Amino acid sequence: MFTYQIKYNSLTNKVILVTGAGAGIGRQAALTYAKLGATVILLGKTVKKLENVYDEILAQGSPEPAIIPLDLNGASQQNYSDMAATISQQFGKLDGALLNAAMLGDLTPFAQIKESMWDEIMQVNVKAQFLMAQALLPTLQKAPNASLIFTTSGVGSQGRAFWGAYSVSKFATEGLMQVIADEYENSNLRTNAINPGATRTQMRSSAFPAEDKDTIAKPEDIMPLYVYLMSDDSLKTNGKVLKAQ
């Protein structure tokens, strides 16, 4: 695991957006950030799941979060602009954004990838990330020090058979991260990507249905890296792909 000693209240007074916050790694990141003092903005497509995480955050005595329902597969550029404007109006700044939401699609031979599936994966995993990041940049720049985190995968740096569209989308994600990191190198904004590794999530179960879940990490096990990149301890870390395991 990534070795980092999480400090109590290290995210106090920070406003952090988490996409895909309704389940899995996004849910755990939201709970963890809130427990460390952050006001968390929960973004996802299923309102009920977001409400459940909202309740969990309040139950642990953390600052009251906010909820933004948004389906990345159908959202327009205007939707992202409106979202960013709302965050700016309500909070005045954005200290961090964890772009965690993604879709896996079908694991299939390259020759059998359906165009519709390819388009959907590229929409959610690439275009939505581009539009989200672009819309959030002005609000991130209002924070003293801001952190933008993308989510990648081992197949985002080394292509793997049958992972076609998902793999290509994560190559694109890493490229997007590197472009933003380089453009904002000498600013208040640092941009990095996390490879969470094998983690006990619904997406992992879909990819490896026969896997013994007890042999892989739980979302809470990989939180040290997620906290490190949101905390001020990572101010000099920029343009990196970091492994949580």
Image (cartoon, rainbow, N blue to C red):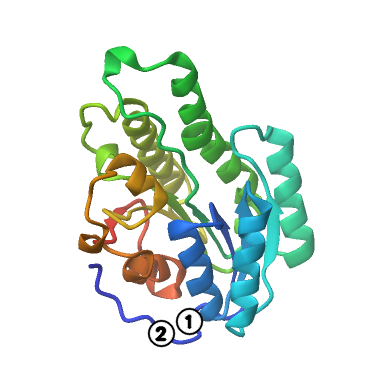
Whether tag 2 and tag 1 are in contact, CB under 8 A, the answer is yes
Q: Residue at x 65, y 72 (%)?
A: 55
In the image, is residue 25 above or below residue 112?
below
> Which residue is disc 1 drawn over?
10
Residue 200: where, in percent of width, then height?
33, 57
Dividing the picture into quarters, in which one does residue 244 lie? bottom left
The dot on residue 7 is 2
For this rendering, which residue is in front, 241 or 125? 125
For the image, the number of numbered tags is: 2
Residue 139: where, in percent of width, then height?
66, 56
Residue 187: where, in percent of width, then height?
50, 57
The C terminus is located in which quarter? bottom left
Q: Residue at x 65, y 32 (%)?
A: 74
Seen from this angle, which residue lies furthest front? Answer: 210
**Amino acid type of disc 1?**
Ser
Q: Residue at x 45, y 58 (%)?
A: 24
For this rendering, which residue is in front, 112 or 84? 112
